[in-house]
Image: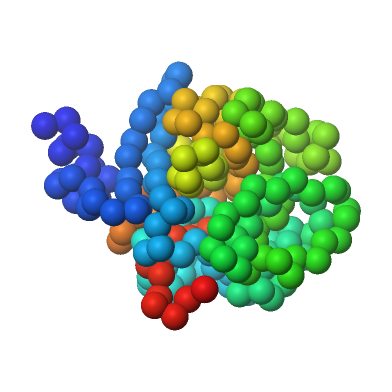
Amino acid sequence: MTAIILSLSLGLPSTPAPSGPVSYGMFKFGSGKYHMVTADLRSTAISPGAIHVQKLTSVWTMVEKEKPLAAITGTFFNPRSERPVADVVVDGKLVATGNRGSAVAVDWFGQVHILDTQFKKSIDWMSYRFLLRGAVRIVSRGAVAVNPQAQKFKDSRIWGRAARTAIGKGDDGRLVMVATNSSVTLSELGKALISQGVKEAISLDGGSSTCLYYRGSLVVPPKRKLSNLFVIRDKPAFDY
């Protein structure tokens, strides 16, 4: 009964999650409760990517148009300009710029990469179809690796306690997208991801921007409009 009650309270189906390459689950680690979408990147049925809009927009508007299976908050943005503060690539086109932070990238073969970049260094992203830069590295080679100051992040709220999102990869071909409304540090977030078998991970935007969408439900709804998302879609027959 507990699982059914939790599912209904989240607006998710009370029946088990559909089998397939993309699934939803929830776990606890320390004092935090985490919502997690897992995608099997070895599957030929799904396609990872990114969504970007010119101005802050309701998440519902973005997902209704793109109809992804799952989506998570993307990179940081400037509330005044409503523009991302770091590089964003969509379908091979650089749609926003800002030379800082780690990145999650999707190459032209649909493979996902977690990348670190040099501060203020402009990069030619031609090898990637989708990319969100400006993230904070939290797990490297299976160990917590949190040092936002070394990545030239100056806002102390980034390494304080907050609601958070993250994306990471395991050695088994899994991509995980995690969101929590629990107030956790970057190190706690990294440890939680490692407990799920993640070897490489970055923290994306959080706080009031924390958002996780899965199959028609906002599992973790944001408290503000957003400008970009990392998504998992059904793969069209002609794609890649």
In this view, which residue lies farthest toward the left? 1
**Image check: 154 left or right of 236?**
right
* Quarter of the N terminus within the rendering: top left
Taking the spot 57% from the left edge, 34% from the top edge, the residue there is: 199
Answer above or below: position of 236 versus 195.
Answer: below
How many numbered circles does the render carry?
0
Question: Does the image show residue 76?
Answer: no
Residue pushed farthest bottom?
A: 238
* Relative horizontal placement of residue 64, taking residue 2 as reference (left or right): right
Q: Position of residue 184 (x, y in %)?
A: 54, 28
Q: Residue at x 88, y 53 (%)?
A: 120
Judge whether 169 appears above or below 96 on screen.
above
Estimate the x, y position of residue 109 in percent, counting from the top left.
57, 66
- Please, is residue 211 above or below residue 45 in the view? above
**Coloring applied to the structure:** rainbow
Q: Position of residue 44 (x, y in %)?
A: 40, 63
| Residue 53, quarter of picture | bottom right
Q: Is residue 187 left or right of residue 149?
A: left
Residue located at (27% from left, 45% from top): 10
Q: Nearer the viewer, residue 148 or 224?
A: 148
The percent position of residue 65, horizontal first and vertical second, equals 42, 76
Task: Determine which quarter of the picture holds residue 126.
Answer: bottom right
Q: Residue at x 22, y 52 (%)?
A: 18
| Vertical side of 176 occupied by 86: above or below | below
The answer to whether any part of residue 69 appears in the image is: yes
